[in-house]
Image (cartoon, grey):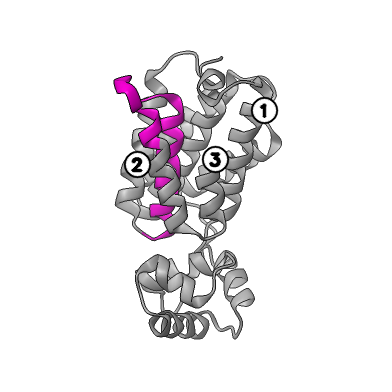
Amino acid sequence: MLSLAAVELGKLARAQELADAARGLGTRGGVGETPPTALAYMATGAVFAAQGQLPEARSALEHAVQFRERVPGISPWATVEAMAMLTQVLLDIGDRSAAAALVDQMRLLLTSQQDPAEATRARLERLERQAAGRPKATSLADPLTEREEAVLRLLQGTLSLREIGQELHLSANTIKTHSQAIYRKLGVSTRHDAVRQGHDAGLLLAARADLRSARVAVRGGLLHCGESPTACDRRS
């Protein structure tokens, strides 16, 4: 959960560090992977997605989803979140058929639960529209490069340009150059307007809202159980 919060704040190096530590704890003692390990893979996938490394994000999120599907009796909410995050990555990659199949799985899982949250329903409907080929994205005359998209994602957070450079292993001057190109292509002059225009153009695809939803769902499930993450996640 902490690693997902770090991704939302744009602190990708810290998020990856926390996710790596969680995966290590989950497999300590030779007991194999545990449900919290799957949450760590979700965070790793979120980090890769924020960095624009979509194939790596897909691999990590598929691992999380497949693990949770193999274990009977665990809480469905983190499974739904992992599926939703993977669906968004599949849409970003352009694999709409795989995204549509996953949306169907999510809807089937949600129908077995009592009164799913309105935010979850709305999120599923948004993903379903995108998977059906009805995205809201607006084409730019001069599209952003993959690196510029990665910078734009991090502009959503609180990191300075220097800190964004550290996250992406680039110099502050390079980030400044990318930012200026982003502003020019989006027709804006401020960071706030660039993020707003990025959302309006469908470039950011509500990524921060999805991460916040994932954190809230996971945290809510743990508080509801009042137990350790492992014990909670094994309850139906």
The number of numbered discs placed on residues in the rendered structure image is 3
Residue type at numbered disc 2: Ala
Residue bounds of the magenta highlight: 23-52
* Magenta portion: prevailing SS class: helix
Depth-wise, is mark 2 or mark 3 nearer the camera? 3
Assign a secondary structure to mark 1. Answer: helix
The residue depicted at 50 percent of the width and 86 percent of the height is 184
Assign a secondary structure to mark 2. Answer: helix
- Left or right position of 98 against 80: left
Q: Report x, y in % for residue 167.
A: 41, 65
Question: What residue occupies the far front of the structure in this picture?
Answer: 29
The image's mark for residue 189 is none
| Residue 213 shows up from this direction | yes
The residue depicted at 34 percent of the width and 34 percent of the height is 63
The image's mark for residue 1 is 3
Disc 2 from disc 3: Cα separation: 16 Å
Residue type at numbered disc 3: Met
Between discs 2 and 3, the one toward the N terminus? 3
Q: Residues within 10 Å of mark 1 (few under 14, many from 20)?
A: few
Q: Report x, y in % for residue 138.
A: 51, 68
User: Badge 2 is on which residue?
Assistant: 60
User: Badge 1 is on which residue?
Assistant: 223
Between discs 2 and 1, the one toward the N terminus? 2
Residue type at numbered disc 1: Leu
Disc 2 from disc 1: Cα separation: 26 Å
The residue depicted at 55 percent of the width and 59 percent of the height is 136
